[in-house]
Amino acid sequence: MQQAEQAQARPRDDVAQDFLVIQNVVKSFDALRAVDDVSIAIRKGEIFALLGSSGCGKTTLLRMLAGFEVPTSGKIFLAGTDIRTFPAYARPINMMFQSYALFPHLTVWDNIAFGLRRDGLPKAEIAERVDSMLKLVQLHVKGYAKRKPHQLSGGQQQRVALARSLAKRPQLLLLDEPLAALDKKLREETQLELVNIVERVGVTCVMVTHDQEEAMTMASRIAVMSEGKILQVGAPDEIYETPNCRFVADFIGNVNTFNGRVAIDEPDHCIVDTLEGQFYVGHGISGTKGMDVSVGIRPEKMRISRNAPEGAYNHTEGVVEDMAYLGSYTVYHVKLKTGKICKVSTANTQRHIGDRPSWNDRVYLSWGQSDLVVLTR
Amino acid sequence: MSSILKCLDPRTWLPGRYFVIGTPYLWLILFFLVPFLIVFKLSFTEPLGAGNPFGQLVTWADGFINFRFKVANYEFIAEDQLYFLTYLSSIRYAALTTVFCLFIGYPFAYFMARAKPTIRPTLMMLVMLPFWTSFLLRVYAWKGILTNHGLLNNFLMSMGVIQSPIHIMNTPVSLMIGMVYVYLPFMILPLYSNLVKMDVRFLEAAADLGSKPWVTFWKVTVPLSKSGIIAGSMLVFIPCIGEFVVPELLGGPQTLMIGRVLWDEFFSNNDWPMAATVAVVMLVIIMFPLAIFNRYQAQEQGAK
């Protein structure tokens, strides 16, 4: 819990060392506050993801970085310069658009050269840079350069878009839902390839996505957004294992939450009373005795068994209501005695296991004292 | 149940499909191809004079079939400089009208397309509003504006800008004003429908890549609206070539156009075969830009 708090509120003094600093940025559309007092500091060379469901303000924030929207208030510093009022064409920032926005009347080559020509670079240098970009995204063969965008597959278009946005060697690369237009299989392949290219070029990168897997695979840090606000900033594992509020816990992955009240609050542990019994949490919390809290447990951190576990804490019992075999793991839906449905997943590490709980079996669920997350918000 | 089966049976709906596809073809055959063939036939006959404007192509005489197939009309058109010059001036005025309409219509359509979606229908309405009054009346109104003692000259003189009236009426200037005025909506509408569909992301992408608004306009907006420009230009150029009313009312002796010649051949000279020949040649001239347009469209279709 405390760890998460620290991750979110980075001390202001080291803001100066950060490459892109977004300071108290607000964007209002009439009565709606699309982006509501957002402050983030992004380090040089990192891939930073803005994650949230549609309408959470992440795209508006990205568009303000690109220069398509002007913040209502707040500042945006890029390498120390406030770029808030710079027009889009004057910013050393390039964007890879959602569904790419490749110019349909230009060839692949001309699309990539578009930005370089606007800078008035000499012809020889443009040719050299375009060719190296084509090599970078592996489209330098088979005459791809001479094709028009509609003659390419979705994956190839995505690469051209990436090459176009990298050709000017921007200081900041923006990716707007970079893989949303690809089908699932191709998306998974492309995720790491995209990261490889971005890292090879060494450009600082801000991406927007609604897909938590995409964010977790690609980004070094993630900001979870909801209703225009940033809820939590942290590395993927930080956000998953120590979410700082119910929304983040619920948005990233699956979670079983139990509402309860703090019964014992000690520096090194606490006990939470819930309808499912007493939960022993193996670390101190920032709350106080008698406080209403939620306890979250990820499905994969619960153990399911036919045998009653020992001890007074951290287990409950129920009936298997449903089970879903998903290949690499199986998800059980267990109906607890209070009527609550609890999700438990077990990895299928062996091909054949004889005795597994099945439909309508009475089972016990248990978990370790460090597998719990206490959520006060 | 049986009615559902009947609907699913291709034999029942196929005639309907042929009917739907066939209707426009039937329309074109009846009201375009057949009249054209009649005109085409006429162009090979010879005039007979009073009361009988054209002769027969095929006659029965003494048990023989006589073909009187004359190409003299075409030869005459090729030889007589007047026709050639008139065609040339028609093409010139049509081309000028197209260019003026494009230069006035493009910004017009552009701002309409970029206007707030709520006021776009109103702007559209305003463009089409002139169609509500008679075409002839509107062209006549220009006469009232442009004559020596018309609205424009009186206004300028009362303001003290000019001392004596400027002679505009019955000159190429008055003709151009009239033609551009009449044909402007035909340029604006296809351009507007093209520009309003344009994805703003292309403009944002251009700006993002360092392109200033004016460069974006030339490098992205204009190329992407090419099909709208071509469609609008065709819609203006083609009817302009054969235009009769505007040159007749606003033009003068310097502005002879082929529509005028056509009229004279028909109604003054009563020489229907010659008039038909003039019409056929005009059609051939119009075919060229149409063919180019069709080829371009086919390419575009192929591209999508």
Image (cartoon, rainbow, N blue to C red):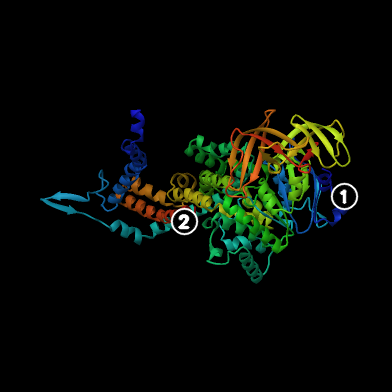
Q: Residue at x 65, y 42 (%)?
A: A345
Asked whether residue B171 appears in the rendered view, the answer is no
| Relative to A283, B143 lies left or right | left
Q: Quadrant of the N terminus of chain A?
A: top right
The quadrant holding residue A245 is: top right
Label 1 marks a residue whose chain is A
Question: Where in the figure is residue A303, as x and y percent of width and height?
Answer: 69, 41
Q: Residue at x 33, y 32 (%)?
A: B6
| Relative to A53, B47 lies left or right | left
Q: From mark 2 to mark 1, how far is it between C-alphas? A: 59 Å
Q: Quadrant of the C terminus of chain A?
A: top right
Instruction: Tell me if mark 1 has few (under 14), some (14-19) or many (20+) residues whose alpha carbon lies within 10 angstroms of its own.
Output: few
| Relative to A339, A372 lies left or right | right
Q: Residue at x 77, y 44 (%)?
A: A242
Q: Nearer the viewer, mark 2 or mark 1?
A: 1
Q: Nearer the viewer, residue B28 or A269?
A: A269
Badge number at residue A12: 1
Name the residue beneath numbered marker 2.
B299
Asked whether residue A19 appears in the rendered view, the answer is yes
Question: Where in the figure is residue B27, as x and y percent of width and height?
Answer: 35, 41
Q: Nearer the viewer, residue A332 or A201?
A: A332
Instruction: Tell me if mark 2 has few (under 14), some (14-19) or many (20+) residues whose alpha carbon lies within 10 angstroms of its own.
Output: few
